[in-house]
Image (cartoon, grey):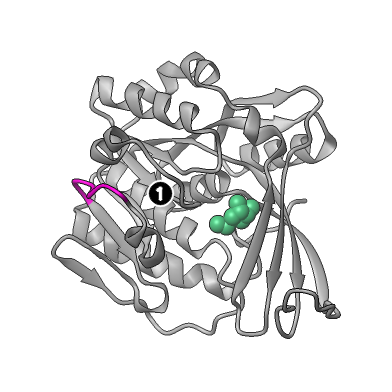
């Protein structure tokens, strides 16, 4: 059975610069290559969930610009339902400046643009899409009231809520208690003020753990770690939606996260 995942989250265009080494503060370095690639934690996770076999609906905001149009068309062609992604007038589509060094390590600066205009009311207009999903997948690159509204809509019908608490931010206890699981890396885990009822911790090159389960990744040649956590979260959500056991979903998510380090950019494809 292919489950339905509704993703409420960000869509960014990533400007990815390859460098030998990251510059220190105050230092100038020469970049090796600039790529323009699809990104944003929400869209990255939506693409990963679709790759895992789920039917995916995306709820979010793009700008009133050609980048947004191009991105939406490309996501639709990849089978993602983007009918609840609305345009934000007078805003640019979200952008991220990503720097990746020769070890694949990345640093990211996000300029949210249209993503910052996603309101709780806008999420309410997509209530049907959220209430009828098997899994609702959230991250923290859109404003918190929108995230909370999506979580409440999921709770109303018993859709499973998967929350990737990234980028790290203070969160209401209720949100952390509704999610099953909260996905965090080790750094984010330490900064959670409340103990979630279910927490899945990603461990970078060491894989991930969730409750009594622990999975290690296969060896890969790392090119770019950008979006590896998103591939993990999207795959986990996609497989949980389709009825996989938690252990199987975790194992597949760890493999997907490892695979995502072998390509440039977050999603493994380029905007046409
Ligand atoms: O998690 C990686 C993502 O973070 C990038 O695609 C970038 O757009 C930022 O949202």
Magenta stretch, residue numbers: 193-198
Q: How crowded is mark 1: few (under 14 residues within 10 Å), some or many (20 or more)?
A: many
Q: In this view, does 105 lie to the left or right of 35?
A: left
- Spot occupied by residue 4 in the image (x, y as percentages of width and height): 37, 35
Q: Which residue is drawn at 78% across and 36% down?
A: 92
| The quarter of the displayed image where residue 69 is located | top right
Along the line of sight, the residue nearer the viewer: 247 or 10: 10
* 264 displayed left or right of 135: right
Please, is residue 81 above or below residue 140 in the view?
above
107 left or right, relative to 227: right
| Residue 195 part of the magenta-drawn span | yes
In the foreground, 164 or 235: 164
In which quadrant of the rendered view does residue 223 lie?
bottom right
Residue 25's spot in the image, x, y percent? Answer: 74, 74
In magenta segment, residue 265: no
Residue under the point 47% across and 16% down: 124
Depicted 165 relative to depicted 185: above or below = above
Q: Quadrant of ligand 1?
A: bottom right
Residue with the mark numbered 1: 164
201 versus 82 height, above or below: below
Q: Which of the two residues, 77 or 124, is positioned nearer the viewer here?
A: 124
Type of secondary structure dominating the magenta stretch: loop
């Amino acid at each position: 059975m292919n489950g339905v995942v509704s993703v409420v989250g960000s869509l960014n265009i990533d400007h990815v610069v390859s460098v030998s080494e990251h510059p220190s503060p105050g230092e100038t370095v020469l970049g090796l290559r600039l790529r323009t690639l699809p990104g944003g934690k929400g869209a990255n996770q939506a693409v990963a969930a679709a790759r895992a076999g789920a039917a995916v609906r995306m709820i979010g905001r793009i700008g009133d610009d050609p980048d947004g149009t191009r991105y939406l068309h490309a996501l639709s062609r990849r089978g993602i339902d983007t009918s609840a992604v609305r345009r934000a007038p007078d805003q640019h589509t979200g952008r991220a400046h990503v720097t990746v060094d020769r070890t694949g390590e990345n640093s990211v600066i996000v300029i949210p643009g249209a993503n910052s205009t996603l309101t709780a009311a806008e999420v309410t207009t997509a209530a049907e899409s959220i209430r009828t999903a098997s899994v609702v997948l959230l991250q923290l690159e859109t404003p918190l009231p929108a995230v909370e509204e999506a979580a409440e809509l999921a709770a109303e019908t018993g859709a499973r809520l998967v929350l990737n608490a990234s980028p790290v931010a203070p969160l209401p206890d209720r949100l952390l208690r509704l999610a099953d699981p909260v996905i965090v890396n080790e750094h984010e885990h330490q900064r959670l003020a409340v103990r979630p009822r279910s927490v899945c911790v990603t461990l970078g090159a060491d894989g991930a753990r969730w409750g009594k389960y622990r999975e290690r990744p296969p060896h890969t040649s790392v090119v770019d770690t950008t979006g590896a956590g998103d591939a993990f979260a999207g795959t986990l959500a996609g497989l949980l939606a389709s009825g996989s056991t938690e252990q199987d979903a975790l194992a597949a998510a760890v493999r997907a996260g490892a695979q995502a380090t072998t390509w440039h950019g977050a999603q493994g494809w380029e905007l046409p």
